[in-house]
Image: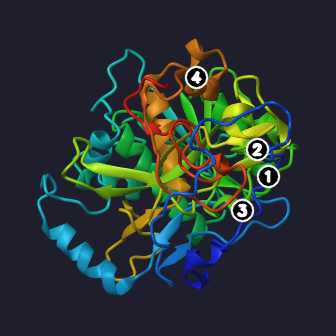
């Protein structure tokens, strides 16, 4: 798949004017089952940020065909606006306190109140699973980390490792310019959230669920603290066993097609932490420095196939089956986007710098936070459950924005406490992990 031949998208077209979709078995209003939703969940949806400009975003990967997954990386292509911003950024001091552009590692550390380094005795590994090969993955990661002053992470110093789906180095799948964009985003986002973690990239031979499942099992066999999956597709249960691994936390993106896209696997599996997306607006008037809203294109929904785990309460979720998301993090490519260095896809006049987003950014960010906590063995397999037990005490509650219109509204509109688009909110330190 050639990146330059991908079709431009207008995400405004993804949000119809009225309800529907979302899949699954949401509890209808007045169903007589005695369940009641928390106050405020039946209110009119809160405003969402304006849709992204027409033609300004590009999916890195094509839509998923039956039996395959698509990646969720979104890349800004508004060249008129992007190139001046890149020039200003590259000429500016990297530690400028007034900076409010696309996210840098220091911004992510501050935004989510993360420790600057991992201080435990065993350095944790973040595993990234993607399809096809990015031949420049290690070199591009090195460039990104050097530019932002992060510790180098290379195969020679033992920090970075790239293997194929069978676990072998040196015999990789065919390259793909689309999935390489996803790989660059995943590696850079994980590095930004945990600069001192090790990183393992496992490349599946293709984007088929069979190959991705094999790669997932290989990643789990490398004993990582967490595995990030920034891809997905329509639900079916056939791949669930590949995303169930004792002592390894698995995160997955909820998708970029709003509530109307329906739940996505592997995020809908109860053994996976489903990570939704948010939009961020710089605000010097608040102590955090940012306002965080549910992203209008982030996925959410009520599974049509996965039974409700015991730790989810239908009176809270409005859903009789598995509800996603569990937690959320930055995803909106325009508000404010995240810097990514990707030389294989092509510089397009910007020297390899891109501004990306999508829930593809959110999943590796949260996986890196789990790695920082490095607490998988203590959680005993209840990885998403730990977020529900925390119930918002260690997250920033996201109470504004929506990703569609639905009934019950908790599935598609941000609210106090739990809601579908943002889960229990965005991380505030590592307490929820």
Q: In percent of the image, x 56 and y 43: which residue is there?
A: 40
Disc 4 is placed on an element classified as helix
Q: Is residue 394 above or below residue 139?
A: above
Task: Pick whichever of labels 1 and 4 is earlier in the sequence.
Answer: 1
The image's mark for residue 209 is 1
Of the image marks 4 and 3, the number of the one nearer the N terminus: 3
In the rendered image, residue 96, in percent from the top left (x then y), is placed at 12, 55
Relative vertical location of residue 265 with respect to residue 429 in this rendering, above or below = below
> Tag 2, which secondary structure?
helix
The circle drawn on residue 261 is 3
**Could you say which quadrant of the image residue 194 lies in?**
top left
Residue depicted at 47% across the width and 46% down the height: 399
Mark 3 or mark 2: which comes first in sequence? Answer: 2
Pinpoint residue 102: horizontal percent, then vertical percent. Answer: 31, 61
Q: Are marks 2 and 1 in contact (CB under 8 Å)?
A: yes
- The reply to whether residue 154 is in sight is no
Q: State the quadrant of the N terminus.
A: bottom right
CA–CA distance between discs 1 and 4?
28 Å
Given residues 187 and 401, the one toward you in this image is 401
Count of marks placed on residues: 4
Residue 321 drawn above or below residue 56: above
> Dot 2 corresponds to which residue?
213
């Amino acid at each position: 798949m050639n990146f330059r031949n991908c079709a431009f998208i207008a995400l405004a077209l993804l949000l119809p004017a009225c309800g529907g979709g979302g899949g699954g078995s949401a509890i209808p209003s007045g169903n007589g089952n005695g369940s009641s939703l928390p106050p405020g969940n039946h209110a009119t949806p809160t405003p969402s940020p304006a849709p992204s400009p027409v033609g300004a975003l590009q999916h890195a990967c094509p839509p998923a065909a039956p039996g395959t997954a698509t990646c969720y990386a979104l890349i800004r292509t508004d060249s008129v606006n992007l190139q001046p911003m890149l020039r200003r950024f590259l000429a500016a001091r990297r530690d400028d306190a007034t900076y409010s552009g696309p996210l840098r590692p220091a911004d992510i550390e501050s935004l989510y109140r993360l420790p600057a380094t991992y201080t435990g005795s065993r350095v944790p590994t973040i595993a990234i699973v993607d399809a096809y090969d990015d031949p420049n993955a290690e070199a591009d990661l090195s460039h990104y980390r050097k530019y932002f002053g992060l510790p180098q992470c290379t195969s020679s110093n033992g920090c970075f490792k790239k293997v194929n789906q069978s676990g072998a180095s040196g015999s990789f799948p065919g390259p793909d310019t689309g999935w390489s964009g996803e790989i660059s985003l995943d590696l850079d986002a994980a590095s930004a959230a945990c600069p001192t973690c090790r990183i393992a990239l496992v490349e599946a031979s293709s984007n088929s669920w069979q190959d991705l499942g094999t790669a997932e099992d290989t990643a789990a066999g490398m004993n990582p603290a967490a595995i990030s999956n920034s891809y997905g597709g329509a639900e079916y249960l056939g791949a669930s066993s590949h995303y169930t691994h004792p002592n390894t936390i698995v995160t997955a993106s909820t998708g970029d097609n709003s509530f109307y896209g329906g739940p996505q696997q592997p995020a809908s599996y109860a053994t996976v932490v489903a990570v939704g997306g948010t939009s961020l607006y710089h605000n010097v008037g608040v102590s955090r420095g940012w306002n965080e809203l549910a992203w209008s294109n982030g996925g959410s929904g009520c599974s049509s196939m996965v039974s409700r785990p015991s730790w989810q309460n239908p009176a809270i979720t409005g859903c009789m089956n598995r509800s996603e998301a569990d937690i959320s993090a930055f995803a909106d490519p325009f508000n404010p986007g995240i810097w990514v260095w990707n030389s294989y896809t092509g510089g397009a006049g910007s020297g390899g710098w891109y501004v990306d987003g999508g829930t593809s950014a959110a999943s590796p960010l949260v996986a890196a936070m789990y790695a920082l906590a490095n607490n998988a063995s203590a959680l005993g397999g209840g990885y998403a459950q730990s977020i529900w037990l925390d119930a918002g005490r260690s997250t920033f509650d996201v109470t504004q924005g929506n990703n569609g219109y639905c009934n019950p509204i908790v599935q598609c509109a941000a609210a106090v406490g739990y809601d579908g688009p943002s889960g229990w909110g965005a991380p505030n330190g590592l307490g929820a992990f």
